[in-house]
Image (cartoon, rainbow, N blue to C red):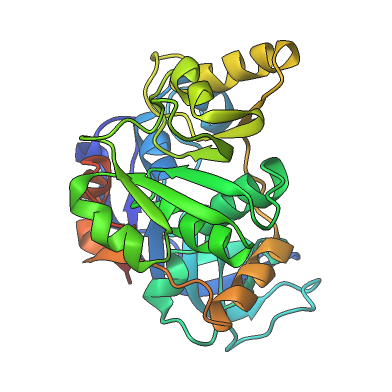
Amino acid sequence: MKAIVQDVYGSTDVLELRDVGQPAPGDDEVLIRVRAAGVEQGVWHLMTGMPYLTRAFFGLKAPRNPIRGREVAGRVEAVGRNVVGFRPGDEVFGTAEGTFAEFVCAKEGKIARKPARLSFEQAAAVPISATTALQGLRNSGRLQPGQDVLIIGAGGAVGSFAVQLAKALGAQVTGVCSTAKLDLVRSIGADHVIDYRHDDFADGARRFDLILDTAGNRPLSVLRRALRRRGTLVIVGGEGGGRWTGGFERSLRAALLTPFVGQKLKGLMTAERQEDLRYLAEVIDAGSVTPVIDKSYPLRDAAAAIRHLRDGHARGKVVITV
């Protein structure tokens, strides 16, 4: 089968389209014929091995799994002997290791049936980005109907899902984004939009019950100025920062600071669960959430897809079609 493979950590130059052996599902796995794969920030971190903390979990000298990609949508080709929830022919979406390939094996508990109203490309955009938004708002943020929520990075992959999910959960939503994305953020349901290049959301004029920061580079002191006295800040991801811990330094500082202030300051660690995929499929099929696709690339152009994501100008998600 064809797959995007790397032998060492590095830039997109280390990625190669190669013929590799087709995987066989284990007892608790399904074999999926990949139709589309999502591109998210984790792909870049695993490709580069940055920050260095990443390598402690995924391989010190090179990635243990050389095939990139973690979000998938496709059809089940075969199932392991312990799998009871799926059968060949089912259309599914979820997460697996090595989805930039024609076939991938996924744990039964990491996939769910694809939302009926979505194409494979749209469904591949959902698993990690939408789950991150959901868990940030609902689980870590404890979002309640009627609360004022600020989504920083509202025009990006996680942010575009967060705006729609926050509205579905009954919040008043303000989105922060660049000038080029203002219309997009309005179109997906934000009640208010702030252009970060011209306006300061932390000027004290307005405070929020919950801030979901998907942009990853503002100091905690700035974010706290926009937060109500008993409000909650949820930091998504670890962009920026040093070479060893990256942007996760902010999450560590938040955890150390929160016992001494009235505000709750949290870093988000997303858990990939089938129950969340099922919930997302329900709200998507109900019409409350629709993935925003910026651009699709063929498998051979996976490196270009990653570069486009890292440029920071993508409106919503970048996906790869197989």
Q: Is residue 308 left or right of residue 258?
A: left
User: Does any portion of residue 96 appear in the rendered image?
Assistant: no
Relative placement, left or right, of 177 versus 165 is left
Name the quadrant containing residue 89: bottom right
| Residue 183 location (% of width, % of height) | 25, 61
Nearer the observer, 282 or 123? 282
Relative to 311, 33 lies left or right: right
**Number of marks drawn:** 0
Asked whether residue 49 appears in the rendered view, the answer is yes
Residue drawn at the location 35% of the way across and 37% of the way down: 7
Quadrant in which the C terminus appears: bottom left
Residue at 66%, 61% (x, y): give it: 110
The residue nearer to you, when weighing 254 against 240, is 254
State the image coordinates of residue 254 (x, y, percent, origin top left): 61, 19
Q: Which residue is at 75% across, 65% downward?
A: 27
Q: Is residue 209 above or below residue 302?
A: above
Q: Residue furthest front?
A: 205
Toward the viewer: 122 or 292? 292
Q: Residue 161, how many percent across, how many down?
A: 47, 59
Quadrant in which the N terminus is drawn = bottom left
231 or 285: nearer the viewer = 231
| Whether residue 92 is situated above or below residue 139 in the rendered picture | below
Q: Return the x and y of residue 257 as percentages of the image width and height.
A: 65, 12
When the figure is inspected, residue 241 is found, relative to residue 32, above or below; the finding is above
Tell me the residue at 44%/26% (across/down). 204
